[in-house]
Amino acid sequence: MHTAIVLPTGFRFDLQEPNSIETVVRTLAPHSRHRITILADEGAKDHGPFDVIEVATKGGRWPRTDRAIAILRDLKPDFLELHQHAPTARRIARALKDIPNAWYRHNFLKAPKGAIQRWRQTRRNRDFDGHIFVSEATRAAFAAAFPVFEDRAHAVPNGIDPAPWRAEVEGKEKLIAYAGRAAPEKGFAELCAALEVVLERHPDWSVGICSNAWTTHGSFAETAVTPLRRFERRFQLETDQPLTSVQSLLKRAAIAAVPSKWFEPFGLAAIEAHSAGCAVLSSGTGGLREASADHALYIDPITPHTIADGLSKLIEDADLRVSLARSGQAFCILEHDAIKRAGELDELREEIKSAVLRRR
């Protein structure tokens, strides 16, 4: 079976500048038993070992979408996997009605406000043969908002290839890591305030931050980290680095913090940290508990005080720290392995395609 994965405008599928959605595709695609072709924007420095068709972006979103439709007509795949952006995904699905499709969502969908918005979204959602979500939490929220589509809503939690992340739990540096966007909703300001307290309390520990899209939030990120710069060698900041830099940081770190304030769709940052053998401090919002289960130390509410106390607890209780690191790593290998997840995704694609053909 030939599956075409269509990424929305603004996605170049660049190995050197990864984002979380592309990382999901990049992790699962190599383990698929299907032939996979990926459509992405032109301009990537390195796609990696994938079959990628670059789509010209001249003229903006709609001309780009028309070009993608023309490419897909020539390609004639057996299945369309349309990622994230609803209007462009729907336009492709309507133009290529003969090809079974699924809309692949990487976040929570906002429930409609009022009857008119519900009618519009219901009409849009009907154009998709299947709806794939990255966690049971996101799937359940969609099904609750649109019960008419519950039989088309499916969850395939994000997976991870543990090998590039794996590090031994023993011998880790006294290092606290944060890998993610420097955004307000990620709890970044609260984390930085907490880290200042923790570095004062524990002078033998250090902090490493690896953040992408650093300039997106303007002066917010710089303001948040400024108090940490006085710790000099005990504070390391890397911005807009390839995925290998995130892997290197987490492999060294004994603790990783995931203090997100918003409802995380799943929690890819958490399973990356678990796989690297970190003890994880988590806010548990959204799908984060699905990602970590009983293998993280959870905080509530999300404040500098609770974060600092949670990190201090992991620093001071070595048995707890090592126990969480070991169990979390084992859990990810067992539950979130990319081979397992890719198999589940392949089965779902085939199931959706078969259901469409039966209806015809």
Image (cartoon, rainbow, N blue to C red):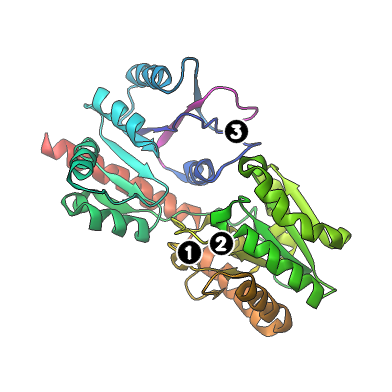
Seen at 19% across and 52% down, the residue is: 151
Q: Seen from this angle, which residue lies furthest right?
A: 233
Residue range (magenta)? 33-47
Compared with 145, 54 (above or below) is above
Q: Position of residue 42 (x, y in %)?
A: 55, 22
259 sits left or right of 309 in the view: left
Magenta highlight on residue 44: yes
User: Which of pointers 3 and 1 indicates the residue nearer the eye?
Assistant: 1
Mark 3 → mark 1, Cα distance in angstroms: 26 Å
132 sits left or right of 41 in the view: left
Seen at 28% across and 36% down, the residue is: 101
The amino acid pointed to by label 1 is Leu
Write down the residue under mark 2: 270
Seen at 21% across and 38% down, the residue is: 120
The amino acid pointed to by label 2 is Ala
Mark 3 lies on a secondary structure that is loop
Q: Is residue 171 visible?
A: no
Q: Is residue 125 visible?
A: yes
Tell me the number on the disc at residue 288. 1
Where residue 187 sits, quadrant-wise, is bottom right
Quadrant, the C terminus: top left
Compared with 80, 219 (above or below) is below
Q: Are marks 1 and 2 in contact (CB under 8 Å)?
A: yes
Seen at 69% across and 65% down, the residue is: 193
Q: Position of residue 178 (x, y in %)?
A: 67, 59
Q: Position of residue 8 (x, y in %)?
A: 44, 32
Where residue 206 sits, quadrant-wise, is bottom right
Q: Earlier in the sequence, mark 1 or mark 2?
A: 2
Q: Position of residue 99 (x, y in %)?
A: 26, 29
Tell me the number on the disc at residue 14. 3
154 sits left or right of 281 in the view: left
